[in-house]
Image (cartoon, rainbow, N blue to C red):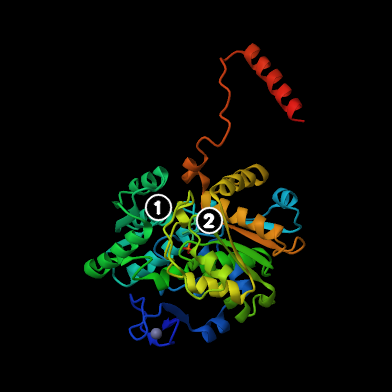
Amino acid sequence: MSYIKALKCRECGREYPKEALHVCEYCFGPLEVAYKYDEIKKSLTKEAITRRPANMWRYRELLPIEGDPTVGAQVGFTPLIRARNLADSLGVKELYIKNDAVNYPTLSFKDRVVSVAISRAREMGFKVVACASTGNLANSVAANAAACGMESYVFIPFDLEQTKILGTLVYGSKVVSIQGTYDEVNRLSSEIAGKYGWAFVNINIRPYYAEGSKSFGFEIAEQLRWKLPRHIVVPMAGGSLITKIWKAFKEFEMLGFVEGIEKTRVYGAQAAGCAPIVTAVKTGSELIKPVRPNTIAKSLAIGNPADGYYSAKVIRESNGWAEDSTDEEIIDAMKLLAETEGVFAETAGGVTLAVTKKLIAQGRIPVDESIVISITGNGLKTQEALQGRLVLPPVINASLKEFDGLVKSLEKKYAARG
Ligand SMILES: *Cc1c(COP(=O)(O)O)cnc(C)c1O
Ligand SMILES: [Zn+2]
């Protein structure tokens, strides 16, 4: 049973059939999936959701596929951790980490969008899936395409982390490395999508793909026992995730599953070396001015974000704010998260935590209200960022005497540090 009503232009409201379309022919506005909310209201309850298996498809009425998912049936329902140690360190009362660093199967939130996109692409009859990626999307498209026996093409900027390149090649995907930035990769991919007729998950079937991100928001609300957080900090690349978390909260409120959305504030996080959306929020501008990225947070390095305008709007509408963090702050935050909570997040997680710290210090996020930090990718994939930033282990021979000596010298070192 499908609850997709149509595709609808976000600007002029014109409706289109639920096909592989993404821009309005009249005003060039982006298309979005519209649902038969009246029917969903009649048939979907919190109790029904709670009884379903622990994956993102427990919200399937609110996800844009017609049949059952044919790939990624196990994606989602990642842990929401009450982060007491980190809360103490930041001086706040109620802090949570939504941990998509352990999402199935490729350890980032991109598995959510990709399972929806590829399931839908198959329903629409596509034989080849593709994407333009800053790394995590590449991993996820390659893995999920392999899992359902589809051919995949992945286009990436040439300077991605080794792990993200190897972690795409291993699935047998056809990877094309482009001498250029993500924005140039994206432009070429749009041309290829038109010419070759492949399903580029984040380009020509983007309306379906993007909806997968809502599950991140649905899960947070359910895991907080059907409550919305007062504050949520979200990393932004193309700016889609942050808009879909907001849409998820609104849909749950509309269905009567949660209340008090007017108290929830959404905050955006970017790296200082690529912060076009943050700049727009801070200057109160409606326009997103493209930048040329230069940051270790490569997964967020999109200089001309497709949903930049809408993410700035969501931030404004919710009375939130946006901040950025330097490479140094990103690394410090990655270490802090690992040392306090045992969570090794990728650079994007460093960005989000560093920005959360800033917003608390600025008094924008009060210390006594619930805060969720969105962790969207795994640190094992961006180890380059920590190269030379951690003290390497001492090397000794396999001798107890040498170890005794080492313990003494370590004791001395810690005593000296106080
Ligand atoms: C892609 C990505 C994001 C941001 O996604 P958008 O929807 O493009 O804003 C955040 N974190 C990680 C780790 C990502 O890979
Ligand atoms: Zn339009």
Type of the residue with mark 1:
Asn
Task: Give the left or right position of residue 218, taking residue 10 as reference.
Answer: right
- Residue farthest toward the front in the current orientation of the protein: 283
Horizontally, residue 120 falls left or right of residue 41, namely: left
Residue 73: x and y, percent? 46, 61
Q: Position of residue 367 (x, y in %)?
A: 75, 60
Q: Is residue 399 above or below residue 389?
A: above
| Secondary structure category for the residue under label 2 | loop
Callout 1: SS: helix
State which quarter of the image contains the C terminus. Answer: top right
Vertically, is 84 above or below 25?
above
Sooner in the amino-acid sequence: mark 1 or mark 2:
1
- Quarter of the rendered structure image containing ligand 2: bottom left
Quarter of the image that includes the N terminus: bottom left
Q: Quadrant of residue 19?
A: bottom left
Decide: is 273 above or below 405.
below
Which quadrant of the figure has residue 293? bottom left
Q: Nearer the viewer, mark 1 or mark 2?
A: 2
* Residue 255 visible in this rendered orientation of the protein: no
Tell me the residue that label 2 is attached to: 272
Q: Amino acid at mark 2?
A: Ala
Task: Please name the residue shown 69% across and 52% down the image.
Answer: 83
Residue 344 lies, with reference to residue 121, above or below; the image says above
Is residue 333 visible in the rendered image? The answer is: yes
Mark 2 burial class by Cα count in 10 Å: few <14, some 14-19, many 20+: many
Label 2 CB sits under 8 Å from any ligand 1 atom: no
Residue on which the image places disc 1:
139
Label 1 within 8 A of ligand 1 by Cβ: no
Measure the C-alpha gap from mark 1 to mark 2: 25 Å
Q: How many marks?
A: 2
Crowd rating for badge 1 (residues with CA inside 10 Å; few <14, some 14–19, many 20+) = many
